[in-house]
Image (cartoon, grey):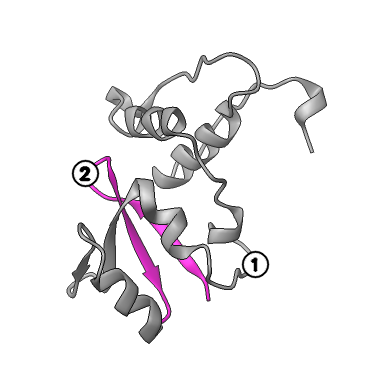
Amino acid sequence: MRVELRPDERPWMVRAKFDYSAGLVKRLGAIPGCKWLPLDKEWVVPIEIAEDIFKYETPQQGGWTTSNIPVLHPYQRDGINSSLNAPGRRWFFTDEMGLGKTAQAIIACDLLSARRILVICPASVRR
């Protein structure tokens, strides 16, 4: 099942759209803070639990699926939330080396549907 995540107007929430699954709908309905938006045909889910909710779904090619959303540390979630609120959608992640800035930047850019991004990293971390 393909799971599409995109930002909500509230920075601590994401919108999730996926093919119907009775089990997943039942799980989402039982979680406080999750809400079905019938007009948009998507769920609003707290960002800090989004990867936990969808991690059991089968990944598809392309787009963000739960298999390629890394497990985030609380400081990374805070950084992503800050970037979603940044004026003009411009920001820098300036943590120390090895703390996951690249993952933060890629996830934030995807949630913002950014068209152009610049990630500067040592050649040793490129794939």
10 Å crowding of disc 1: few (<14), some (14-19), many (20+): few
Q: Amino acid at mark 2?
A: Arg
Mark 2 / mark 1, whichever is N-terminal: 2
x then y, percent, for residue 108:
44, 38
In magenta, the rendered stretch is: 1-20
Using the image as rendered, state which of residue 30 and residue 13 is in the foreground: 30
10 Å crowding of disc 2: few (<14), some (14-19), many (20+): few
Using the image as rendered, state which of residue 47 and residue 39 is in the foreground: 47
Q: Which residue is mark 2?
A: 10
Question: Horizontal placement of 119 versus 116: left or right?
Answer: right
Q: Which residue is mark 1?
A: 61
Name the residue rendered at 61%, 70% in the picture.
Answer: 60
Task: Residue 36: name its quadrant.
Answer: bottom left
Tell me, yes or no, if residue 20 can be seen here: no
Question: Horizontal placement of 65 versus 34: left or right?
Answer: right
x then y, percent, for residue 37:
19, 69
